[in-house]
Amino acid sequence: MKKDYNPFQFLKDVDHINDSIFIHHTKIEEQLPMHKHHKHQLSYIEGGVAFLNTPTNSYFLPARHFIWMPAGMEHNVELRSPFIMVRNLYFPVDLFPKDHKLRTMGIYPVTDLIKEMILFTEEWKGGFTKEQTHQHEFLIALRNVLMAVSRVPIPIALPTTKNELLKPILKYIHHNLEEPLKLNLVAKEFGMSSRSLSRIFREHIDISFLQYLKMTRVIRSMEMLLETNKSISEIAYTYRYSSIGAFSNVFYQISHIRPVDFRKQNLKKGGK
């Protein structure tokens, strides 16, 4: 594919042939604002850290996982590392039963088999239909594997908002995670009472200030576990936890995995 391939032409090409399974191995999705298409999308991101953004949430994508975006869902992909390959596959809607989990958004582990099958399509670009027997049959086999193994998505979603009062507060939290961000201190920073700030969080993103802070720190910790050589204790104390045990418990509460296992699992599977 040419380097100057227009990202908006790319979107037209994805949906141009309704029954084609479309393949594109580049970072072109990063060039697009919020968008949607008429096919389900699988994105497997190699190396580094990425987020899937929707109008209401931001989803952290650990190494060795894929994002599944159902047809019609508004989204964009945000890459946090400079050297990343994004492998995108787009499947017609009718290839998946209406009651299957892959009709809804999710982030799933990439098994060795799925990884090798995705990499096998390295040189394939564009759409493939039943007339192109070899490629299409292979992609249908990949569809079957995805349906068989993609059962439990990981629950790592950070709520976002369009509310003009709350947006700068969320930004402030993200930029000061290493500081003692207590409810009363953040409320004072923005000239409001603790009660008012707590109410704004509940009304606009439906979680408490404390839960939002915990989730943000855990997600930032995940980035550090994958992208740095810092010890788990260093990361815990960076984000104001009193002990490794306290950090590990909160990490498990949010992600259902201990930080030591998260690092071991993702670095091993990512081939680092």
Image (cartoon, grey):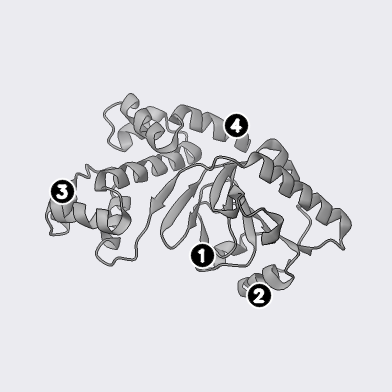
Which residue is identified by label 2?
9
Ranked by sequence position, the earlier of labels 2 and 1 is: 2
Picture coordinates of residue 207, whole percent (x, y): 30, 49
CA separation, marks 3 and 2? 48 Å
Residue 139 vs residue 63, the one in the foreground:
139
Residues at discs 4 and 1 in contact (Cβ within 8 Å): no
CA separation, marks 4 and 1? 32 Å
Ranked by sequence position, the earlier of labels 4 and 3 is: 3
**Which label lies toward us, 2 or 1?**
1
Which residue is identified by label 4?
268
CA separation, marks 2 and 1? 17 Å
Q: Residues within 10 Å of mark 2 (few under 14, many from 20)?
A: few
Residue 185 vs residue 160, the one in the foreground:
160
CA separation, marks 1 and 3? 35 Å
Kind of residue indicated by mark 1: Glu
One can see residue 132 in this view? yes
CA separation, marks 4 and 3? 40 Å
Image height of 118 relative to 243, above or below: below
Which residue is identified by label 3?
185
Q: Quadrant of residue 39?
A: bottom right
Ranked by sequence position, the earlier of labels 2 and 4 is: 2
Image height of 57 relative to 111, above or below: below
On the rendered structure, is 125 left or right of 194?
A: right
Kind of residue indicated by mark 4: Lys
Quadrant location of the N terminus? bottom right
The residue depicted at 47 percent of the width and 34 percent of the height is 229
Residues at discs 4 and 3 in contact (Cβ within 8 Å): no
Picture coordinates of residue 64, whole percent (x, y): 60, 41
Picture coordinates of residue 140, whole percent (x, y): 77, 51
One can see residue 85 in this view? no
